[in-house]
C-alpha cells in the first residue's frame, strides 16, 4: 500500500524577544521626537495652523452646502482663521499694555509688602543685607542679556506670526482639493481614514468645548474679581481664558498674577478669596462638568495629559504646551485606536479602560460593505464632498 506523500511544515522563524521589540520601539520614538525638535520652528506653526483649520473648516462646508462659490467659501475660511489669531494677539497685547500702565500706581504697596517680607525673613535668620546682596548681583550686563533675550522672544513671535499667515493662505488655497484627497484616502487606506476622521472629530470637539468652558470660567473670574475690588479684572479674565488651553498647569499660571494683585491692592484676605474662588470654579467646571461634554474628545487620563504637556513642550517649545493634547490625540488615533494589536495600550492611557478591547481590523470596503464608513462618520470629519474637476468628475464620497 502506497504511503501518502509527507508535506513539510513551513519553517517558522523565531519572533524577536519582547525586550528587543520594546527597545527598538523606544529608540524609533526617541529618534522621531528628536527629529521633530530639530524642525520645531516649521512643525509648530504648521500643526497650529492645521488645528485652526480643523476647528474652522465646517464654515467652508456649510457655505458650500448653501451653494456659495467655493472661492468665496475659501476666503471666508481664511478670514475666520485670521479672526481667531487676531483676537488672540489683540487680547494678549491689550492685557500686557493695561498691566504696564497700572503697575506704577502700586509702588507704595509693593514696598510695604517688601518690608513685611523682609521682617518675616529676619525671623528665620535671613537679614535684609543678604537680600540686598542678591539684588546687587543683578548687574547691567545681566540686564542687557535679559533684554536681548526678551527682544529675541518678540522677534520669534513676529516670525511665528508671519509663518502662520503664509501657511493660512496656502491651506486656504489648497482646501478646494480636501474633498478629493479625503475620498482617495478613504478608498485606498480605510483604516488610516478612520483614524484621521476620529482625530478630526475629537480634536474639533476638544477645541470647541475647551473654548466654551474657558469663556465660562473667565466670566466667573471677572465677576468675582470685580466684586472683590481687584484691579484689572478684565486683564485677569483674558489671562484665565488663554491659559485655559494649557492642560493641568494653565490654571496655576492664570491664578498667580491676580492673587498677587489682590495682595498689593487689597489685603491678604482678598488674595485668599481669589485663590479659593479660582480653585472652586476650576474644579467644578473644568474637572467635573467639562469632561462630561468633552466625551471621547480628550480620552486620556490626567497623568497622560500632564506627561503630554511635558513631552510636547520639550519638543515643540511654547506651542507644544498649547498643542499637547491635540498631538497626543493624533498619536493615539493613528497608532492605537484603530490597530487591533495596539488597542491594549488604551488600558494604560485611555480614560475608558474598556476601549482597550481589540476591534476587528478594518478591511477594504469593497470586500466588506458592512465596514464602509457611513455618512455620519463623513460628517463628523467635517470634510465636504470633492469638487468636480475639469474634464471629468469625481464621485462624491
Image (cartoon, rainbow, N blue to C red):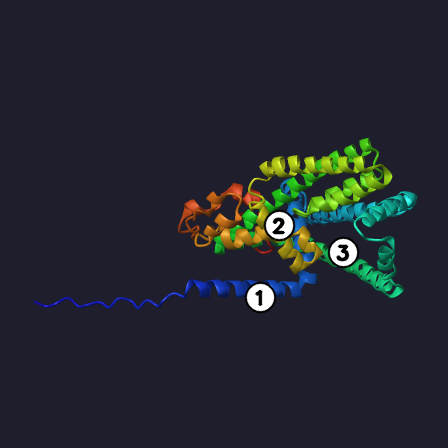
Indicate the position of residue 187 as horizontal and vertical percent values. 49, 53
Of labels 3 and 1, earlier in sequence is 1
State the SS at label 1.
helix
State the SS at label 3.
helix
Left or right: residue 6 versus residue 342 is left
Q: Which residue ends up furthest to the top in the rendered image? A: 227
Left or right: residue 395 versus residue 224 is left
Taking depth in this image into account, of 376 and 103 the one nearest to the observer is 103
Task: Give the crowd class for mark 2: few <14, some 14-19, many >=20 residues within 10 Å.
Answer: some
Looking at the image, is mark 2 or mark 1 nearer the viewer? 2
Taking depth in this image into account, of 244 and 268 the one nearest to the observer is 268
> CA–CA distance between discs 2 and 1?
22 Å
Taking depth in this image into account, of 368 and 218 the one nearest to the observer is 218
Indicate the position of residue 87 as horizontal and vertical percent values. 77, 45
> CA–CA distance between discs 3 and 1?
28 Å
Residue 265 placement: quadrant: top right
* Residue at 82% from the left image edge and 39% from the top image edge: 262
State the SS at label 2.
helix
- Please name the residue that numbered disc 1 is placed on: 31
* Residue at 72% from the left image edge and 49% from the top image edge: 78
- Please name the residue that numbered disc 3 is placed on: 161
Q: Are marks 2 and 1 in contact (CB under 8 Å)?
A: no
* Residue at 49% from the left image edge and 55% from the top image edge: 189
> CA–CA distance between discs 3 and 2?
27 Å
Indicate the position of residue 86 as horizontal and vertical percent values. 78, 48
- Please name the residue that numbered disc 2 is placed on: 306
Quadrant in the picture for the N terminus? bottom left
Indicate the position of residue 350 as horizontal and vertical percent values. 52, 47
Mark count: 3
Do we see residue 194 in this rendering? no
Of labels 3 and 2, earlier in sequence is 3
Amino acid at each position: 500500500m502506497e504511503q501518502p506523500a509527507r508535506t513539510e511544515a513551513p519553517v517558522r522563524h523565531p519572533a524577536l524577544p519582547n525586550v528587543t521589540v520594546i527597545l527598538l520601539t523606544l529608540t524609533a520614538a526617541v529618534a522621531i521626537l528628536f527629529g521633530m525638535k530639530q524642525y520645531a520652528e516649521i512643525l509648530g506653526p504648521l500643526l497650529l495652523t492645521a488645528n485652526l483649520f480643523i476647528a474652522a473648516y465646517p464654515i467652508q462646508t456649510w457655505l458650500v452646502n448653501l451653494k456659495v462659490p467655493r472661492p468665496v467659501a475659501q476666503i471666508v475660511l481664511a478670514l475666520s482663521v485670521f479672526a481667531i489669531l487676531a483676537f488672540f494677539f489683540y487680547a494678549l497685547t491689550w492685557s500686557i499694555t493695561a498691566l504696564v500702565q497700572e503697575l506704577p500706581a502700586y509702588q507704595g504697596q509693593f514696598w510695604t509688602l517688601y518690608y513685611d517680607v523682609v521682617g518675616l525673613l529676619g525671623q528665620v535668620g535671613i537679614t535684609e543685607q543678604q537680600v540686598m546682596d542678591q539684588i546687587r548681583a543683578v548687574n547691567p550686563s545681566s540686564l542687557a542679556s535679559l533684554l536681548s533675550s526678551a527682544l529675541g522672544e518678540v522677534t520669534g513671535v513676529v516670525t511665528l506670526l508671519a509663518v502662520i499667515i503664509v501657511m493660512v493662505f496656502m491651506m486656504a488655497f489648497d482646501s478646494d482639493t480636501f474633498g478629493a484627497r479625503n475620498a482617495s484616502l478613504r478608498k485606498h487606506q480605510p483604516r488610516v481614514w478612520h483614524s484621521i476622521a476620529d482625530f478630526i472629530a475629537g480634536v474639533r470637539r476638544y477645541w470647541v468645548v475647551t473654548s466654551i468652558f474657558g469663556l465660562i470660567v473667565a466670566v466667573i473670574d471677572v465677576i468675582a474679581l470685580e466684586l472683590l475690588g481687584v484691579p484689572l479684572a478684565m486683564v485677569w479674565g483674558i489671562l484665565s481664558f488663554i491659559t485655559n488651553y494649557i492642560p493641568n498647569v494653565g490654571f496655576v499660571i492664570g491664578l498667580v498674577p491676580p492673587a498677587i494683585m489682590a495682595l498689593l491692592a487689597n489685603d491678604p484676605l482678598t488674595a485668599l478669596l481669589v485663590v479659593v474662588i479660582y480653585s472652586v470654579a476650576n474644579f467644578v467646571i473644568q474637572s467635573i462638568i467639562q469632561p462630561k461634554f468633552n466625551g471621547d474628545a480628550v480620552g486620556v487620563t490626567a497623568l497622560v495629559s500632564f506627561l503630554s504637556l511635558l513631552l510636547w513642550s520639550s519638543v515643540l517649545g511654547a506651542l507644544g504646551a498649547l498643542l499637547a493634547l491635540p498631538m497626543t490625540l493624533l498619536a493615539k488615533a493613528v497608532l492605537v485606536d484603530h490597530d487591533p494589536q495596539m488597542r491594549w495600550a488604551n488600558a494604560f492611557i485611555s480614560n475608558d479602560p474598556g476601549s482597550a478591547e481589540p476591534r476587528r481590523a478594518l478591511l477594504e470596503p469593497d470586500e466588506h460593505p458592512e465596514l464602509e464608513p457611513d455618512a455620519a462618520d463623513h460628517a463628523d470629519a467635517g470634510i465636504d464632498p470633492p469638487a468636480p474637476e475639469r474634464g471629468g468628475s469625481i464621485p462624491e464620497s
